[in-house]
Image (cartoon, grey):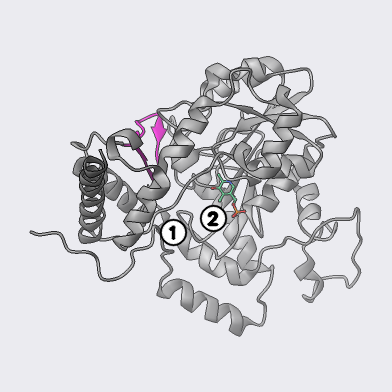
């Protein structure tokens, strides 16, 4: 069939919110209680059961959740936390906001995740912990990370923002007590959403009351009970804190999204493997690793890397050409150390980068783009994405031959 440009724009992702969520939101409004309350508590119970963790507290975003983990673990000015550059900047910013220093190590170019072989060289007497990021929904090699952390007395916090439903060696991400805490995100782009939202999962119950305080004004009682019959009208503030609570309006979505998550992820997996099959002959692009039994992918993102010298376009031009074909893509991510603030910071403090730099993070960061992937994407949409990619490559080759 001759190529035809898609008439309407195809976004790279779209949230899957159905009638159950809508009915629950309406029920929440009718109940007279729309902010933090019984539905938020019920959602926390579902998250614990799903991930196999004894404690899980929800709040307004994963970014706030990450900030609170730094506060609870009492990061002091100058304390070092090791992570990767190929992540959303909040992984680093939340360390900086608490006065800490994000120390960067390079990624494994196959997985885009932290390379455990590079970890030990980054450890100093000031290192407190490691934040591995399960980028694209592909679990990091946790056994190696935990082994090194335990050997050096460091904590591990998993950035599981993209990893709801992913599993490592048979355990859900966040469900292994060798990590002190794990953080999930329910932003609309993630595999399940509450509009905005995040959560901290953890095993040590001693953190529970502090995290509750830090998410809500420094008060650690369930505030909504103040308004119920059994509540006392008095509150006590134990420390100054932000307001980052989660609304029952959000929980109304989460209660149904989590029931649908395995179905969503199964469909994402089908589409992910279908992309691999549809593009297996294309040597102008690098296809992502789909994980294996130990590294159970939740297929959050399908990240393609292009070979600009074979395509005849750089990544930004390739993305622009796909947009002309009405195909939306995302960039996950520009390496954090390239952003102006971090560029200046590491220029002033080069000891917090590896001696040989971050060549794999930079190489991939310049070449990657995320293709449309969400459970409602149809096979015909996917065929159109791949046809547009082939067309862009073919045109770029013709154009580069003309220029030569
Ligand atoms: C989305 C994301 C975050 C931030 O999540 P929010 O809920 O939007 O604050 C942090 N880290 C990674 C890797 C993410 O993908």
Report the magenta residues as a range.
286-306
In the rendered structure, find residue 73 and report the number of the disc placed on it. Answer: none
Q: Quadrant of the N terminus?
A: bottom left
- Magenta: predominant secondary structure element? loop
Are the residues flagged by discs 1 and 2 in contact, CB closer than 8 Å? yes
Name the residue: 29% across, 39% down.
311
Name the residue: 33% across, 67% down.
9
State which quadrant residue 125 falls in.
top right
Viewer-proximal residue among 28 and 133: 133
Q: CA distance from mark 1 to mark 2?
A: 9 Å
- Asked which secondary structure carries label 1, the reply is helix
Viewer-proximal residue among 119 and 109: 109
Does any portion of residue 140 appear in the rendered image? Answer: no
In the rendered structure, find residue 259 and report the number of the disc placed on it. Answer: 1
Does residue 349 appear to the left or right of 133 in the view shown? right
Viewer-proximal residue among 15 and 97: 97
Give yes or no for residue 305 being in the magenta stretch: yes
State which quadrant residue 249 falls in.
bottom right
Residue 25: percent from the left, percent from the top?
Answer: 54, 76
Give yes or no for residue 312 being in the magenta stretch: no
Q: Is residue 333 above or below residue 11?
A: above
- Disc 2 marks which residue? 46
Does residue 349 appear to the left or right of 180 in the view shown? right
Name the residue: 48% across, 38% down.
365
**For mark 2, does the 10 Å Cα neighbourhood hold few (<14), some (14 to 19), or many (20 or more) residues?**
some
Q: Is residue 34 above or below residue 301?
A: below
- Asked which secondary structure carries label 2, the reply is helix
**For mark 1, does the 10 Å Cα neighbourhood hold few (<14), some (14 to 19), or many (20 or more) residues?**
few
Residue 232: percent from the left, percent from the top?
Answer: 87, 70
């Amino acid at each position: 069939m001759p190529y035809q440009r898609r008439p309407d724009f195809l976004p790279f992702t779209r949230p899957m919110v159905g009638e159950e969520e809508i009915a629950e939101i309406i029920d929440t409004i009718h109940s007279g209680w729309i902010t933090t309350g019984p539905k938020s508590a019920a959602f926390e119970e579902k998250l614990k059961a799903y991930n196999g963790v004894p404690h899980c507290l929800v709040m307004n975003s994963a970014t706030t959740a990450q900030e609170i983990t730094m506060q609870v673990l009492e990061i002091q000015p100058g304390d070092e936390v090791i992570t990767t550059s190929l992540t959303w900047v909040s992984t680093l910013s939340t360390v900086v906001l608490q006065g800490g220093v994000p120390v960067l190590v390079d990624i494994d170019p196959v997985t885009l995740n932290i390379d455990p072989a590079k970890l030990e060289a980054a450890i100093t007497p000031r290192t407190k912990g490691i934040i591995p990021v399960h980028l694209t929904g592909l679990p990091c090699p946790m056994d190696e990370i935990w082994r090194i952390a335990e050997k050096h007395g460091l904590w591990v916090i998993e950035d599981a923002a993209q990893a709801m439903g992913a599993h490592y060696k048979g355990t859900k991400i966040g469900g292994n007590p060798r990590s002190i805490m794990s953080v999930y995100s329910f932003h609309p782009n993630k595999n399940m959403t509450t509009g905005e939202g995040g959560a901290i999962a953890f095993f040590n119950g001693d953190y529970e009351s502090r995290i509750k305080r830090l998410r809500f004004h420094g008060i650690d009682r369930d505030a909504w009970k103040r308004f119920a019959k059994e509540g006392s009208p008095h509150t006590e503030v134990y420390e100054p804190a932000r307001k980052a609570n989660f609304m029952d309006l959000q929980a109304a979505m989460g209660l149904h999204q989590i029931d649908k998550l395995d179905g969503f992820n199964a469909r994402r997996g089908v589409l992910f493997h279908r992309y691999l099959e549809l593009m297996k002959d294309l040597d102008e692009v690098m296809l992502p690793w789909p994980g294996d039994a130990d590294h159970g992918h939740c297929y959050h993102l399908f990240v393609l890397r292009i070979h600009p010298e074979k395509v005849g376009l750089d990544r930004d031009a390739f993305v622009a050409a796909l947009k002309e074909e009405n195909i939306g893509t995302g960039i996950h991510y520009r390496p954090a150390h390239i952003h102006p603030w971090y560029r200046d910071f590491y220029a002033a403090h080069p000891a917090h980068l590896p001696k040989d730099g971050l060549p794999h993070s930079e190489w991939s960061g310049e070449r990657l783009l995320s293709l449309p992937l969400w459970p409602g994407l149809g096979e015909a949409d996917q065929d159109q994405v791949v046809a547009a990619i082939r067309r862009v490559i073919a045109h770029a080759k013709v154009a580069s031959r003309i220029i030569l």
